[in-house]
Amino acid sequence: MIAVIADDFTGAAEIAGLGLRYGLKVEIESHLFTESNADLLIIATDTRSKEESEAYEEVFIITQKLKNIGCDWVYKKTDSVFRGHIYNELKAMLDANGVKKALLVPANPEIGRKIKNGIYFVDNKFIHETNFAEDPEYPVTTSDVKTLMRTNDRDNIKLLNAKSEIYEWGISIGEAVSEEDLNDWATKIDNTIIPAGGAGFFKALLEVKGYKRKILVNGENNSFGEKFLFVCGSAFSKGKAAFTNLQNCKRKTFPMPDAVFNNTSQSKDFFKTWEKNVISAFDDNNFVILEIDQPVVRDKKFAKRLREDMARLVEHVLNKVEVNELLIDGGATVYSIAERVGLNKFFPVQEIAPGVIRMKVQSRNDFHITIKPGSYPWPESLLDIPCEEK
């Protein structure tokens, strides 16, 4: 069995999509995971949204549990643009496994994310000049890779080009500008090295280890349900307007009320009205959209409260309405909703597009969740959802 530890839910789902593509039986579980008979077991944590010490402790415990159940190899899925506590989580895995070195290859050239000469580029732009600079929890203010690691222990980090050998200790960051570079790094991994990084490097590892691609990305929408709830929890604009051009569904959008967003003295009353309006909207609409149509606030506690408010609303809606399809934009939002609703085991069934994964959940029939990272676009195939006009 292959195991992956991801620091957010959409990262876990992106890896799950690759597993499906390569014909693996895939499960995603929360940090409270049990033994599994899956070919690919992915542990979805929310450590990106936690403090450094909490992230270290959780990853350390998970790594020890995976070591005890006997995995063929373990991969650390990190954010491809260095959001989160990457250094601390890799250090936790090193300490828990008793090994000395890790190789981090976060770049994903297939989607325009490249590292060259110690600088991170997205679509040939410096990363700090892209919309990643607007992230509310991890705003990117530099394109220097070592600085993006957010640690003072820079002596423990080595930056290498694809033809270099991996250092005998510490964390090596592998530069990559092509698929060939990813494959070169993958050939250097053995059981003395913890591999880590983005989806591109994981795919390269699968191929180097002999796995063959068996399934194409399946963008066709078949057997979708009748009622859709879309939750836009991302600060990235790629998610907010995605479904405004739906042709086949009667839809309605409900932004978070200002009083709820600002947590004023009237927030409880406005929340109840928001909830009532969303629930009643399903009487006349197939597709209901929830969004936070507000300026980005760069404050972790503020962002966490917004996620929790959105998760509470989703819980109340699911208790009142037989929603068949829940679509969520943003990994931290997915995790908050899953925790609130009590979902901890997921069975990916379709990779609609890279990073866009549709899943069944344990103990809920006729219900699917489709999720994607906030920085990825929703595929156009989803704009042809075959639901009937009311």
Image (cartoon, rainbow, N blue to C red):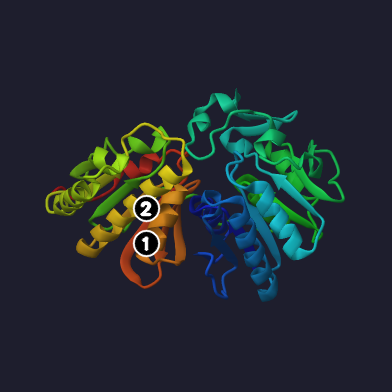
- Three-letter code for the amino acid on which mark 1 is drawn: Arg
Location of the N terminus by quadrant is bottom right
- Three-letter code for the amino acid on which mark 2 is drawn: Glu
Q: Which residue reaches farthest front?
A: 265
Dot 1 crowding, Cα within 10 Å, few <14, some 14–19, many 20+: some
Residue highlighted by disc 2: 308
For residue 189, which quarter of the picture? bottom right
| Precedes in sequence: disc 2 or disc 1 | 2
Query: In the depicted view, which residue is nearer to us: 56 or 245?
Result: 56
Q: Residue at x 60, y 68 (%)?
A: 39
Determine which of the numbered discs, if any, sits on residue 340 in the image: 1
Query: In the depicted view, which residue is nearer to us: 271 or 113?
Result: 271
Q: Is residue 49 left or right of residue 289?
A: right
For residue 312, which quarter of the picture? bottom left
Element type at marker 2? helix
Position of residue 364 relative to residue 248, above or below, is: below
Q: Residue at x 61, y 40 (%)?
A: 82
Q: Is residue 207 left or right of residue 239?
A: right
Q: Residue 231, image x and y in percent?
A: 33, 47
Q: Residue 234, image x and y in percent?
A: 41, 41
Dot 2 crowding, Cα within 10 Å, few <14, some 14–19, many 20+: some
Residue 265 visible in the displayed image: yes
Q: Are marks 2 and 1 in contact (CB under 8 Å)?
A: yes
